[in-house]
Amino acid sequence: MQWQIEPQFVGSFDVGEHVYFFFREIAIESGGLERNVYSRVARVCKKDIGGRVVLRQVWTSFLKARLNCSISAQYPYYFDRIQAVTRVETSDDTLFYATMSTSETAFVTSAVCVFSFKNINQLFHHGFFVDPTSPTWLPLPADAVPEHRPGTCVPNSHSLSDSDLHFAKSHLMMAEPVSGGVPLLPTRDVVFTHIAVDNSSTSHRAPPSANSLSLPALSTHHVLSAQLIRTVVGTSPDRHVIRERKRMDRVWGERWISSWAGRGSSECSASAKPRPQSAYPGDTVHFHGVPAAVWKRDGNEIVSTSRILFTNEGGLILMNVSKEDNADYECVVHGKQLIKYRLVVDHDECTQPRSVQAYKSCQREWCKKADQYKAALADWHDAKRRNAQCMVNDSTSHLHNRIE
């Protein structure tokens, strides 16, 4: 089994007696004909100096596992490409916050997943290994693992037997993934390239003992998701200096809201202002959403009709809109409002078009009227042809009667 296949490393961390690596690579378990990319976490012992003969000057304790960041559904929605990772210390665990994105398709989506240090170690210490002889990557039975379990740290790796090292060499990957929980801030058409944690607390005058700001309400900060596209280029003891890398077309909020000391949830909900969306009669309007979203109109859940459609990406499509569609449309995920649109359909037919969009709308209306005219004209010609045929038949019948 190969150690890595075209790996792209995004972060490494020194924790206890191990070093942890986060990276993405070509997934060997996806099949030889496909080049799917999976995210991984790998671990090695700090004192690993390789084997005496087998794995000489090569790590003997290397293990890796897939990072599972996905939205649970009948067909799970996977964020398989890790882009960045940062470490957050809590009172009872070490958490790794990672920005993840979907495969490089036309509809890229990003999210943040949180991986627990305890869960990672639990898998490496007690999980099943992949059986490299299985064509379907089945787990290796627990009784097939030798007494020296691969990945276990020892004072001197030269003391390991050749049989143990041969086994470790062919059993590098865990059969189960590390779960990242429910993805936070799922956002379409954006790649979250960096994530930063403010480890100082001077801006909020927190007690000196606090060494980090917790993120308990991160999942409620949907209004802040646009800010994750910014890149940290420098820091100072009091603040992060940031430079905008890319300005999003969908700006969901105008200001930051802190979640320190348990604040943030109510403030974020209150700060979500409706985003205005203009349209003209007959237009088709597309509101962007996220998978598993529920759409509401003025607080009432929307159901699909011949004119109202839902996309696989969680968007809402309104066809042939009219002034009756003027309302607030909310995208709700897990009971929390993600974004709100306010649709305004211009129903003043006498208004002179003043934009390209308005001219296109007028053009569409004229095309519809032209199509209606063509259809009516075709019906008229068809009726005229039938009447003419009837007249010919009548004339023929009268002539035949006279001859008789």
Image: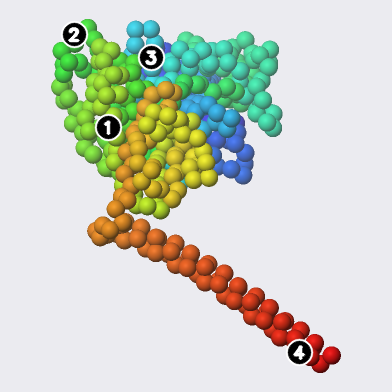
Which residue is more in the foreground, 308 or 4?
A: 308
The residue under label 2 is: 208
Residue occupying the point 38% across, 17% down: 95
Q: Which residue is mark 4?
A: 399
| Residue 331 picture quarter | top left
Q: Nearer the viewer, mark 3 or mark 4?
A: 4
Q: CA distance from mark 1 to mark 4?
A: 81 Å
Q: Does dot 3 land on a helix, a strand or a loop? A: strand
Residue lying furthest right: 404
Dot 4, crowdedness within 10 Å: few (<14), some or many (≥20)?
Answer: few
Question: Mark 1 sits on what residue?
Answer: 273
Label 1–label 3 contact, CB within 8 A: no
Q: Residues within 10 Å of mark 1 (few under 14, many from 20)?
A: some
Vertical position of residue 248 compared to residue 333: above or below: below
Is 283 positioned to the left or the right of 31 in the image? left
Marks 1 and 2 sit apart, C-alpha to C-alpha, by 36 Å
Closer to the chain start, of discs 1 and 2, is 2
The kind of secondary structure element at disc 4 is helix
Please, what secondary structure does the residue beneath circle 1 have?
A: loop
Mark 2 and mark 4: span between their CA atoms?
A: 114 Å
Q: Earlier in the sequence, mark 3 or mark 4?
A: 3
* Amino acid residing under circle 1: Lys
The label nearer to you, 1 versus 3, is 1
What whole-number distance in Å separates the C-alpha atoms at marks 1 and 3? 35 Å
* Label 2 vs 3, first from the N-terminus: 3
Question: SS class of the residue under badge 2?
Answer: loop
Q: Quadrant of the N terminus?
A: top right
Question: Disc 3 designates what residue?
Answer: 94
Q: Which of 73 and 346 lies nearest the eye of the viewer?
A: 346
The image position of residue 348, as x and y in percent, is: 29, 53
